Image (spheres, grey):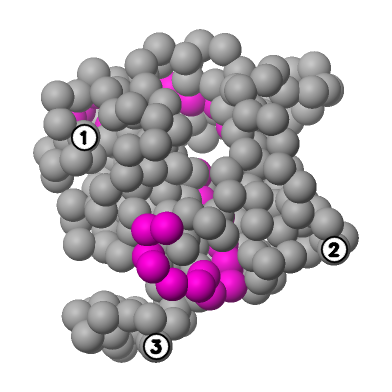
Amino acid sequence: MAVAAVLMGACVAGATDQVELPVVGSPEWRHLDIPGVEKRTRYGVYEEDGRRILRAESDCGASGVAVAVEPLDLDRAPFLQWDWRIEQGLVIADERSKPGDDFAARVIVMFAFDAAQASFAERALHRVAETVRGETLPGRSLAYLWTSAQPEGEAWRNPYRSPTFLISLGRGVSSDWRSVSVNVHEDYRRYWKAEPPPVVGVAILTDADNTCGRAVAHYANFRFSAVDAEAGAAPTE
């Protein structure tokens, strides 16, 4: 399924200080295929301590799930927060390269396309993609990762030429639940050197297609907030 089709399928809204995304595994989260990859990641939902959790398992495959967001001004709620747990990670020599572009856990924030910010190449590719697909596509994105070897805070451009910055939130073994709070507004300004357009979608991706490995991750409790939260603490019930 194309990204635009996913993002046109559902929208979420919330109070002025917090925007709750639909519970993971609900119909608003649509499956997102990766062009050229035949084997999908397996996504399933289970209950634990009174909350719904999404389990992602990838064996030499890749696909994601995505939810649309009513265009969200990050001045209103700049922090994206969620919980995740890495049951089985990957061991990759060079995650910055195309052959090593696999991550046990990846959360992607997608922004509205802004022609004024885009480079000539980005504008040209975006026009071609929309013409071919006949859909309105998002523009730039930020991807927050749990990595094999990249230290927390490391960031680099996606090696596949897509307009995405990849940002490591940690590496190695992480079998315990972690609560994450990232300032998407500041990260966009830091890496793209511009003010962020509205957020239009969030995606989850556990993938191991390039290295043909196996990765398992769990995700829960996605929301945008005006208030930062302590990262690294165990999630509340």
- Is residue 132 shown left or right of residue 195? left
Q: Which residue is mark 3?
A: 116
Q: Which residue is mark 2?
A: 16
Residue 226 in view, yes or no:
yes
Between discs 1 and 3, the one toward the N terminus:
1
Q: In terms of sequence position, does the residue under pointer 3 or pointer 2 come before the other?
A: 2
Q: Position of residue 206 (x, y in %)?
A: 40, 35
Q: CA distance from mark 3 to mark 2?
A: 28 Å
The x and y percentages for residue 50 are 83, 23
- Comparing 18 with 67, the one in front is 18
Type of the residue with mark 1: Glu
10 Å crowding of disc 2: few (<14), some (14-19), many (20+) = few
Q: Residue at x 22, y 85 (%)?
A: 120
Q: CA distance from mark 1 to mark 2?
A: 38 Å
Q: Amino acid at mark 2?
A: Thr
In the rendered structure, which segment of residues is drawn in magenta? 190-219
Q: Which residue is disc 1 drawn over?
A: 95
Q: Position of residue 117 (x, y in %)?
A: 38, 81
Find out whether residue 236 is within the magenta segment. Answer: no
- As helix, strand or loop, the secondary structure at mark 3 comes to loop
Q: Which quadrant of the rendered structure holds the N terminus?
A: bottom left
In space, the residues marked 1 and 3 are separated at their CA atoms by 31 Å
Where is 157 relative to 179, above or below?
A: below
What's the residue at 65%, 57% (across, down)? 78
Q: Amino acid at mark 3?
A: Ala
Q: Secondary structure at mark 2?
A: loop
Whole-percent x and y of residue 75?
A: 68, 67
Q: Residue furthest right?
A: 15
